[in-house]
Image: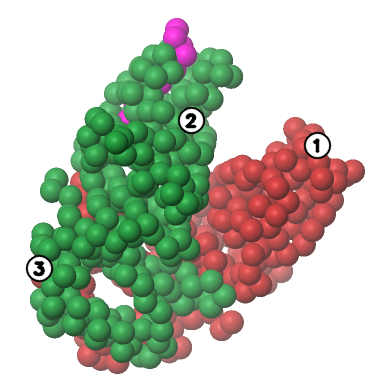
Chain colours: A green, B red
Amino acid sequence: MTVSVAFQGERGAFSEAAAIKYFGNGVKPVPLPSFEEVFAAVHDGQCVYGIVPIENSLAGSIHRNYDLLVRHNLHIVGEVNLRIIHCLIVNPGVTLKEIKRVYSHPQALAQCEGSITQIGAEPFPTYDTAGAVRFIKEQAVTDGAAIASRQAAVDWEMDVLQEGMEDWGENLTRFLVLSPKEEVPESDAKTSIVFAMKDVPGALFKALSVFALRDINLTKIESRPLRGQPWQYLFYLDFEGTMAEERCQRAIGHLGEITSYFRLLGSYSAATE
Amino acid sequence: MTVSVAFQGERGAFSEAAAIKYFGNGVKPVPLPSFEEVFAAVHDGQCVYGIVPIENSLAGSIHRNYDLLVRHNLHIVGEVNLRIIHCLIVNPGVTLKEIKRVYSHPQALAQCEGSITQIGAEPFPTYDTAGAVRFIKEQAVTDGAAIASRQAAVDWEMDVLQEGMEDWGENLTRFLVLSPKEEVPESDAKTSIVFAMKDVPGALFKALSVFALRDINLTKIESRPLRGQPWQYLFYLDFEGTMAEERCQRAIGHLGEITSYFRLLGSYSAATE
C-alpha cells in the first residue's frame, strides 16, 4: 500500500522533496495549502503521515509549526534534513536586468537576502516557494522572478536564471514527520518535549539541570509566548535519548516537579546527516 | 532641540506610537522603509535614537531585529511596552461582508488570526501595518481590509469597521530604544547580552548557571542560528541587573570562560508596565 504524506505547498515544494527523501520513491505526497491543514489531515486520518519544516540552518525556526505542535495532538515520529538549493526562476525570455521584484516564502527570502540585494530587486513575500513560481507564471510576470527549487521550475515549465541563491553554502532545513500514533525507538534517538515553568526564580536553569545532572545532551531550545500571560513562555526542548531509556524517564519525572504544563512530543530516530 | 527617532513603517505605525510614549510629544519620529535603515540611520547619526519592536506577547519575537542587533554596533538604552489594539480598516463604504482579503504585517495577522478566520477572509502579508492602509487606499480596494492602529485610519482618512481585532486582550509589544552611545543606569535595570558557546556538553546549562549561582533572574532567552554552522546557535539573554553592579560584572566574567563569542548589548531601565 502506498503511504500518503501530507505536506504544505505546491508540487515541487521542498517539503515534497523531504517526504521522498524520508519515505522513498513509493510515497504519495499530498499537497495542502496550509500547515494547519497538514496537521488536520494527519489527525483526521486522510493521510497516514505529515511532514513539516521546523528549522532552517540560516533563517532559524519555523515558529508557526512550533505553535501547531502544541495545538494539535500529534506525535513526532521522525526527522529528516534536506539540503536547500534555491533557484532564481523566471518566465522564458526574462533576463536578470528586468527583475524588479523577487517573490517567495519569507523564509526563502531571508536565506537569499544578500543575493536579492545584489540583483537590486525588492523581496516580495508569498505563501510558499513553488506557489511563487505558479504565481509569476499565471500572472505572466515579466519584471519579476520567483525563488524556489529546481523541481518547481521543471514542474511549472519555467526557466532557471541562477542556481544557489542562498547566502551561505550550508543551507539545511530540518523537517519533522508527524503521526497520530506514538512510535518509541529503543536507541539512537532524539526526544522533543514542550513545557511551561512554575513562576519560581531560576526556573529555566532548574529545568535544564534535570538533563545536565544525568548527562543528557540538549540539541535545541526554543521559546514561544504563553498566550494571555505577557512575557511568560513555553519552552521546546530537544534532547539526545529516547523515552525507552530509564534515565530519560527519570529526567522527565524530575522535570514534572517544576513545570506547570508538560507534553511529550515524541522520541524518534535522529537524522543521520 | 527636538530629538529625532528613527522607526520602521509609515505614519501611524505602532513604532511611532511607542516613540511618543517613550520620549514624549516633543519627539520627532522619522519614518523609514525597513528595520535595516533604522539601524543605519542611528549608526550614521542621521537620527539620535532608533526604536524597534523586539517581541509581542501573542506572536513572539521579531527575529529580524535580533539578527540586526548583532550585525550593527548599537547599544540598547531603553525599552517600552505598548498595548496593541488592532483595527479593521476599510475604504469608506466597504462593509464586513465584502471583505475577502485582510492585508497587514505578518506579526499583526498572527495576532488577529482567529478574528480573520471568523470574517471568512484570507490573510495577505504586507511589509507594515500602516503601509497596508496606504495600499488599500491607493489601490481603492473594495473587497479587502487592512489591520493597523486607529491612528493609521485617522492619518489616511479611512474607516474603522472593528476595533480590538487581536485574539487575546493582553496584546503588548516590547520596543527597544537604540543609540550609538552606551548609557548604564545605576539600578532598576535590565541587561541584554548575546553569546555563542564553546562546543562542550551541557554548554547552555553552564551558561545559565553563572546567573543562577548569583541569584540573577533571567527574563528572556532567545536562540538564533549561527550562520555557516548548522544546528549551532547564538543565544540572546535578558537578565535583571545592570553592568554597574559588581555581581553582574562577575557573572559576565564567568560567562566569558565558556563562550566563543560574547557581546554586551546594553543595560537600560526596565519598562515599568
Q: Which residue is mark 2?
A: A131
Judge whether residue A99 is colored magenta: no
Q: What is the quadrant of residue A140 in the picture?
A: top right
Q: Chain of mark 3?
A: B
B26 or B166, nearer to the observer:
B166
Q: CA distance from mark 3 to mark 1?
A: 58 Å
Number of numbered discs present? 3
The chain carrying label 1 is: B
Q: Which mark is residue B142?
A: 1
Q: In the rendered structure, which amino acid carries the disc numbered 3?
A: Val
Residue at 43 percent of width and 49 percent of height = A45
Q: Hey, what amino acid is under mark 1?
A: Thr
The vertical placement of A124 against B179, above or below, is above
Q: Which marked residue is nearer to the observer: mark 3 or mark 2?
A: 2
Residue at x-position 31% and y-position 84%: A256
Question: Residue A79 or B38: which is nearer the viewer?
Answer: A79
Q: Which residue is mark 3?
A: B200
Residue range in magenta is A86-94
Kindly give the residue lying farthest to the front in the view shown: A1
- Chain identifier of the residue bearing label 2 in the image: A
User: In this view, which residue lies farthest toward the right?
Assistant: B93
Q: Is residue B226 left or right of residue A199?
A: left
